[in-house]
Image: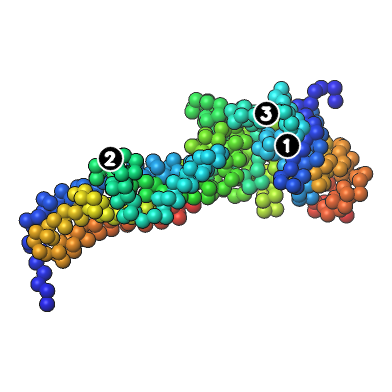
């Protein structure tokens, strides 16, 4: 029978906290940048101009249909060789994760916008609004309400995806726990603690999402 | 008609793919005139109405409302979004399915046009919006959301929203077709009131009795052409064309407003 000893982890607490800080900070960056890419992708795919639509579609499908682990390695190792673009592991992984998340956000945002009844934009147009005024004042406020649960869900996935940056030696929570596990010879305790840390942050978030969905159901 | 008409449509054509929906339509509406467009579904009457405020862009012909004229077809450039928006601001439109903005209160719905399009100060827009809501008899519903209103109330808010732009022309696209029968009257009353105030209106409707009562001219359309046109009472009471007669035979024809009084 295995003898659990979580006490041993106490001496690595600063390492863990450090890693957790990197993980949370990283998530904030890739969610914000990902949403920006997502907005660009969504508006691109809804554009009147064919070139923009095709460009957006290419971006979405390339990043949505390839594994994030491959993208991370590709951005860090392949870009310097193929394009001469050198990046720090942090920049490379932030860019890859933002684009990967952005491709999914694009589809969520696009779906939210097209789910709004055509009559809404017609009513805006009939009042004399320009298409961009109609989008800002009429369509987006309604669409965002519908997008929020899916956007939150994707952001939770993004939070967990940050664990993959450890392959590029970015010192996130998983990377630091690898260090601790090797040092302490206690991988079971270490990775269990890591899992608990992720869940402790995410479970309250999922409760908020669920509550939001319920409120949404009431107001519609 | 010695005066120049308020609305003038010449040689209007529109196709969706290979389906010609409007074939060479001509239409004049005098200032203060009320024209009813009737006809079976698929006759092109809604498309014609939507061409008047260019919600549907015609393939050929010309549309003039007031002093603004647009020509379409070979060699004419499509108007840009700003020009279109400014033009639409002068015509009010009421839709079959109301199309109220569900994320705004009734008052905000009516204030939206004046604030966003006419750049009116918020307090002025509110005064205007409250006056329009009072006009359609819904002053006390100002702070409610559309979801809490009945169909008839929603449509009256939609009329108030269009009127808040102080348009020269009002277009009604089957404004009562989505309503329960007992709610139709309250909306028709508002339209009738507008007619008596001299608003220029084009009304697509299936309410033949109402058209007879309120419209001064009536246009019967079928398959994208105007089959018969004339004074509303004359066309309804004494249609000249066989197609018009067939269509009208589906309705109570006597035209008295509560159809219950009609003698068959």
- Does B98 appear above or below B250? above
Neighbourhood count class around disc 2 (C-alpha, 10 Å): few under 14, some 14–19, many 20 upward = some
Q: Are marks 2 and 3 in contact (CB under 8 Å)?
A: no
Q: Could you tell me which residue is drawn at 45 percent across and 43 percent down?
A: A41
Q: Quadrant of residue B153?
A: top right
Residue that badge 3 annotates: B77
Secondary structure under badge 1? loop
Q: Is residue A180 left or right of residue A149?
A: left
What subunit carries mark 1? B
Q: Are marks 1 and 2 on the same chain?
A: no
Q: Position of residue B48 (x, y in %)?
A: 74, 39
The answer to whether residue B54 shows anywhere in this view is yes
Neighbourhood count class around disc 1 (C-alpha, 10 Å): few under 14, some 14–19, many 20 upward = some
Q: Position of residue A167 (x, y in %)?
A: 24, 53
- Does B121 appear above or below A68? above
Secondary structure under badge 2? loop
Residue B59 is tagged as: 1
The answer to whether residue B194 shows anywhere in this view is no
Q: Comparing marks 1 and 2, which lies closer to the viewer?
A: 2
Of residue B185 and residue B78, the one placed in the foreground of this image is B78
Q: Position of residue A12 (x, y in %)?
A: 9, 55
What subunit carries mark 3? B
Of residue B141 and residue A114, the one placed in the foreground of this image is A114
Q: Distance of mark 2 from mark 3, alpha carbons? A: 49 Å
Q: Distance of mark 1 from mark 3, alpha carbons? A: 11 Å
Q: Are marks 1 and 3 on the same chain?
A: yes
Residue A86 is tagged as: 2
What subunit carries mark 2? A
Of residue A109 and residue A125, the one placed in the foreground of this image is A109
Q: Are marks 1 and 3 in contact (CB under 8 Å)?
A: no
């Amino acid at each position: 029978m295995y003898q659990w000893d979580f006490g041993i982890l106490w001496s690595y607490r600063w390492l863990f906290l450090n890693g957790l800080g990197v993980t949370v900070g990283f998530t904030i960056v890739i969610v914000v940048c990902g949403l920006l890419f997502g907005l660009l992708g969504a508006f691109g795919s809804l554009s009147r101009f064919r070139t923009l639509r095709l460009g957006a579609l290419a971006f979405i499908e390339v990043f949505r249909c390839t594994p994030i682990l491959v993208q991370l390695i590709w951005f860090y190792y392949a870009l310097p060789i193929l394009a001469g673009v050198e990046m720090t592991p942090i920049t490379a992984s932030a860019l890859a994760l933002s684009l990967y998340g952005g491709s999914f956000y694009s589809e969520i945002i696009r779906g939210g916008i097209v789910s709004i009844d055509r009559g809404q934009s017609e009513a805006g147009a009939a009042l004399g609004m320009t298409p961009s005024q109609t989008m800002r004042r009429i369509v987006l406020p309604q669409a965002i309400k519908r997008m929020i649960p899916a956007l939150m869900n994707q952001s939770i996935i993004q939070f967990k995806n940050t664990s993959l940056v450890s392959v590029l030696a970015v010192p996130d929570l998983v990377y630091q726990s690898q260090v601790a596990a090797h040092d302490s010879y206690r991988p079971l305790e270490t990775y269990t603690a890591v899992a608990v840390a992720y869940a402790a942050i995410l479970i309250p978030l999922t409760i908020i999402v669920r509550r939001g969905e319920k409120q949404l159901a009431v107001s519609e | 008609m010695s005066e120049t008409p308020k609305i003038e449509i010449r040689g209007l054509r529109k196709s969706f793919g290979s389906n010609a929906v409007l074939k060479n339509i001509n239409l004049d509406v005098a200032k203060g005139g009320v024209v009813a467009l009737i006809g079976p579904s698929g006759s092109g009457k809604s498309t014609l109405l939507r061409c008047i405020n260019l919600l549907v862009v015609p393939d050929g012909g010309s549309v003039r409302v007031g002093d603004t004229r647009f020509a379409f077809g070979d060699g004419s450039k499509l108007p840009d979004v700003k020009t279109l928006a400014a033009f639409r601001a002068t015509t009010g439109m009421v839709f079959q399915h109301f199309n109220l903005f569900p994320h705004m209160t009734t008052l905000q719905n009516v204030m939206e046009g004046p604030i966003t399009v006419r750049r009116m100060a918020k307090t002025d827009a509110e005064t205007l919006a409250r006056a329009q809501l009072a006009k359609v008899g819904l002053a006390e519903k100002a702070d409610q959301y559309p979801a809490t209103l009945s169909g008839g109330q929603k449509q009256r808010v939609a009329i108030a929203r269009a009127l808040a732009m102080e348009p020269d022309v009002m277009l009604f696209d089957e404004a009562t077709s989505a309503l329960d029968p007992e709610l139709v009257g309250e909306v028709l009353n508002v339209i009738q009131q507008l007619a008596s105030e001299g608003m220029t209106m084009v009304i697509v409707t299936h309410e033949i009795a109402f058209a007879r009562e309120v419209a001064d001219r009536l246009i019967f359309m079928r398959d994208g052409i105007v089959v018969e046109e004339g004074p509303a009472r004359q066309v309804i009471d004494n249609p000249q064309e066989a197609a018009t007669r067939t269509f009208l035979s589906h309705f109570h024809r006597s035209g008295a407003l509560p159809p219950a009084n009609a003698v068959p």
